[in-house]
Amino acid sequence: MNNSSHINNLIRHYKKDANIYDFNRRFFLFGRNRLIRLIDDSLNPSSILEIGCGTGINLLKLHNIYPNTSITGLDVSQEMLKVARLKSFGIKNISLINDFFDENTSLPKFDLILCSYTISTIPNIGIFLNNIKNHLTKNGHFACVDFHSTNITLFKRWISHSIPIETHFPEHLLEGLFTVKRFEIRRAYGGVWKYFNYIGQKR
């Protein structure tokens, strides 16, 4: 699937989901709050980018921790960003961009780049991670929470019924790009699937 087809699929999917996203995703997108806490414990960034910021739930949490930090949210879905704009209205240090993150994205470098259940929707994860590294400052950090693995076929089919979702994260792609600061794998629903939290520093 080329980028154009992939982007169109994402736009169609999240156009339907935007108004119910915060409600229904809380039942299976685990680890997001924990990742924010891990960031708070270890970092003090002056600029943050969240790729795939969706409805802005993480942006507000980051703003509460870092009220003087420049925070940018990027998402391909205009419908999701409409919700994020309502949530962040009047917060001057949060800016929102409607775009797809790739090698052509025109953005400055950031101290911290965050992905929350975004990487699993990307068809070429290796290129995506390399682009993230290129958009980090010299000592910048990458933080991520996402699906790690599952052996349950029915779950794989269910999670990918609308858009392709990668349910086995290729950890080796992080090697050579980042120095691991934190990496933990946790179980969801008794092991139906696993998810992970990761923080790495640019090499």
Image (tube, helix red, strand yellow):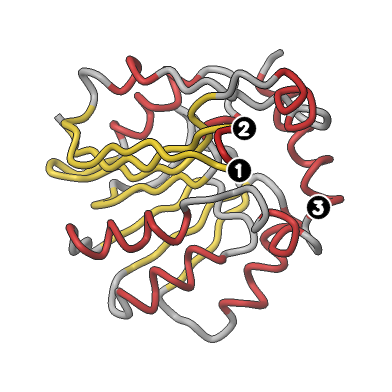
Name the spot of residue 57 as percent of width and height, x first. Answer: 56, 66
Are the residues at dot 1 and dot 3 in contact (C-beta closer than 8 Å)? no
Label placed on residue 151: none
Which residue is under mark 2?
Answer: 192
**Quadrant assignment, res 190:** top right
- The residue nearer to you, when weighing 54 against 181, is 181
Taking 190 as reference, is 178 left or right?
left
Are the residues at dot 1 and dot 2 in contact (C-beta closer than 8 Å)? yes
Are the residues at dot 2 and dot 3 in contact (C-beta closer than 8 Å)? no
- The amino acid pointed to by label 2 is Val
Label 3 neighbour load within 10 Å: few <14, some 14-19, many 20+: some
Residue at point 59%, 82% (across, down): 89
Q: Earlier in the sequence, mark 1 or mark 3?
A: 3
- The residue nearer to you, when weighing 192 against 102, is 192
**Quadrant assignment, res 115:** top left
Which residue is under mark 3?
Answer: 17
Residue at point 29%, 32% (across, down): 133
- The amino acid pointed to by label 3 is Asp
Cα–Cα gap, marks 1 and 2: 6 Å
Quadrant location of the C terminus in the rendered image = top left
Cα–Cα gap, marks 1 and 3: 23 Å
Which residue is under mark 1?
Answer: 189
- Nearer to us of marks 2 and 3 is 2
Q: Is residue 171 above or below residue 139?
A: above
